[in-house]
Image: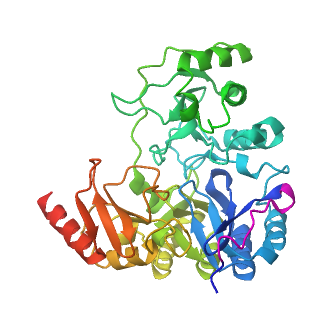
């Protein structure tokens, strides 16, 4: 029987991990530093999902995992299992403060400016240990970019930091690194060793200034200027911010690098990437992935990268990923489809977006990305997608492109597929 949203109470599970109600039961988010978990941890998540939940596990667009369908009487046992596996926070009431995103190739890309994984670990530790920072919204997020060739640069972050060399980082607020001429510029630069102090000053300044309704940096910027914020940040620092960075632009990232086999660092091992269909695994799939590599990394594209794969095994691993149903090439339909939880798991959704996306995959044109959203909130895609289908009723969608107005309304999935096919031919 499907659990009702009202039947489940949000639980902090003795101050460690928060489980929130959803239409299909409790939802437990597992926050992963650099998106990474060991094969042993992946097996724990798979078993826990089967034992205490529905057996379904979502990969999120911030490279975390979510166990779905958690029964109310199993919440504490689930959290205990995850904490014992090293997947919980290090201090009580700090689970929501572990939102630091990095590249799936952090520490692995030989072309990166530096390995940011130690810095990410330092910042996550800092966020958890400072009790005042626990006041930040669960959605408040940071990004640390080491200049990797694969990086999600389109997500809007409350604070972003991007390396311009191994010794220096630039930063900005409420957005992402500038790549194009009209993008908001970086605000200032600091030495790499000063980044933790800078982040501490930025977050405490936010808490000093924000009104109760201002839960994100973009909210604060409606009432406080950048100059006012930076002035207060500078007062907290023992070093000067370098403001001469307005012309810096971040080199492009290539999202296609999340697929296939890539050199991993300077050794002989490789990493192998593939797309999780619609961002959803079941327990058996996750266990099978754990059998293929000693480490896994989830990505902000709701995909997975297998690490430390011997180069001699790479092609066999690719074949096994395909056999599990993962997309191993960027041209495959499930490599170009995003769908939110849909009406099976979310009370706000007007349609079963996962099932509709499965139908659409059968007739996708050979190019173009499509996002199916159960409502206008578009939770599943924080970045721009070529075509968005927003549900207005079960099995019915309004279709949007770049313009704010709908290009077509009240389409069935079959009609949407035909529209996409015509659009593809016209292009």
Examine the structure image and report whether residue 12 is included in the region drawn in magenta: yes
Residue at image point 69% right, 27% down: 193
Q: Position of residue 221 (x, y in %)?
A: 54, 27
Query: Would you say residue 30 sits in the magenta stretch?
Result: no
In the image, residue 319 sits, relative to residue 98, either above or below, namely: below
The majority secondary structure of the magenta stretch comes to loop
Left or right, residue 78 beside residue 146: right
Residue 161 drawn at (x, y percent): 57, 33
User: In the shown orientation, is residue 127 left or right of residue 313?
Assistant: right
Q: Quadrant of residue 366?
A: bottom left
- Seen from the viewer's position, the closer of residues 375 and 19 is 375
Of residues 47 and 137, the one nearer the viewer is 137
Q: Quadrant of residue 298?
A: bottom right
Quick one: quadrant of the C terminus?
bottom left
Point out residue 315 in the picture as x, y percentages from the top left corner.
Answer: 46, 72
Residue sticking out furthest to the front: 6
Q: Say which quadrant the N terminus sits in.
A: bottom right
Relative to residue 87, is residue 156 depicted above or below? above
Q: Residue at x 61, y 20 (%)?
A: 229
Against 305, is 206 above or below?
above
Task: Note whether residue 336 is visible.
Answer: no
Image: 164 above or below 347: above
Q: Is residue 352 visible?
A: yes
Q: What's the residue at 59%, 16% (across, down)?
A: 228
- Farthest-out residue, bottom: 1
Question: Which residue, as the protein is rendered here, is positioned at the far left?
Answer: 426
Provide residue 35's location: percent of width, then percent of height.
Answer: 62, 56
| Rendering colour mode | rainbow
Query: Based on the displayed image, in which of its 4 quarters is residue 163 positioned?
Result: top right
Q: Residue at (68%, 38%) from the top-left corner? A: 119
Q: Which residues are magenta?
A: 4-15
């Amino acid at each position: 029987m499907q659990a009702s949203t009202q039947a489940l109470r949000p639980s902090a599970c003795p101050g460690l991990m928060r489980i929130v109600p959803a239409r299909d039961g409790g939802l437990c988010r597992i926050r992963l530093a650099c998106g990474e978990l060991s094969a042993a941890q992946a097996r724990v998540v798979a078993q826990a999902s089967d034992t205490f939940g529905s057996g379904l596990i979502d990969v999120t667009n911030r490279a975390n995992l979510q166990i779905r369908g958690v029964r109310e009487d199993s919440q504490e046992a689930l959290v205990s299992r995850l904490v014992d596996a090293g997947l919980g926070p290090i201090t009580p009431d700090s689970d929501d403060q572990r939102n630091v995103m990095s590249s799936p190739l952090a520490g692995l890309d030989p072309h990166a400016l530096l390995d940011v994984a130690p810095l990410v670990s330092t910042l996550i530790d800092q966020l958890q240990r400072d009790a005042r920072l626990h006041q930040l919204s669960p959605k408040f997020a940071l990004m640390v970019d080491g200049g990797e060739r694969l990086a999600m640069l389109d997500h809007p972050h409350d604070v972003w930091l991007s390396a311009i060399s191994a010794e220096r980082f630039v930063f900005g607020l409420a957005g992402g690194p500038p790549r194009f001429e009209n993008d908001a510029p970086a605000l200032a630069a600091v030495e790499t060793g000063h980044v933790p102090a800078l982040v501490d000053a930025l977050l405490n300044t936010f808490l000093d200034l924000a009104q109760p309704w201002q839960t994100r940096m973009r909210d604060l910027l409606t009432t406080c200027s950048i100059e006012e914020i930076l002035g207060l940040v500078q007062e907290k620092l023992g070093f000067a911010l370098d403001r001469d960075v307005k012309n810096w632009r971040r080199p492009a990232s290539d999202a296609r690098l999340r697929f296939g086999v890539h050199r991993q660092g300077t050794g002989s091992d490789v990493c192998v990437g593939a797309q999780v269909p619609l961002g959803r695994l079941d327990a058996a799939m996750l266990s099978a992935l754990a059998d293929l590599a000693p480490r896994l990394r989830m990505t902000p594209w709701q995909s997975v990268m297998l690490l430390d794969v011997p180069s001699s095994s790479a092609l066999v691993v690719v074949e096994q990923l395909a056999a599990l149903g993962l997309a191993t090439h960027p041209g495959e339909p499930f490599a170009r489809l995003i769908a939110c939880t849909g009406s099976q798991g979310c009370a706000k959704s007007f349609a079963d977006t996962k099932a509709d996306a499965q139908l659409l995959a059968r007739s996708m044109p050979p190019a173009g990305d499509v996002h199916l959203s159960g409502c206008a909130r578009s939770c599943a895609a924080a970045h721009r997608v070529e075509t968005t289908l927003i549900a207005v009723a079960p099995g019915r969608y309004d279709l949007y492109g770049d313009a704010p107005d709908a290009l077509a309304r009240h389409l069935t999935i079959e009609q949407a597929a035909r529209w996409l096919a015509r659009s593809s031919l016209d292009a």
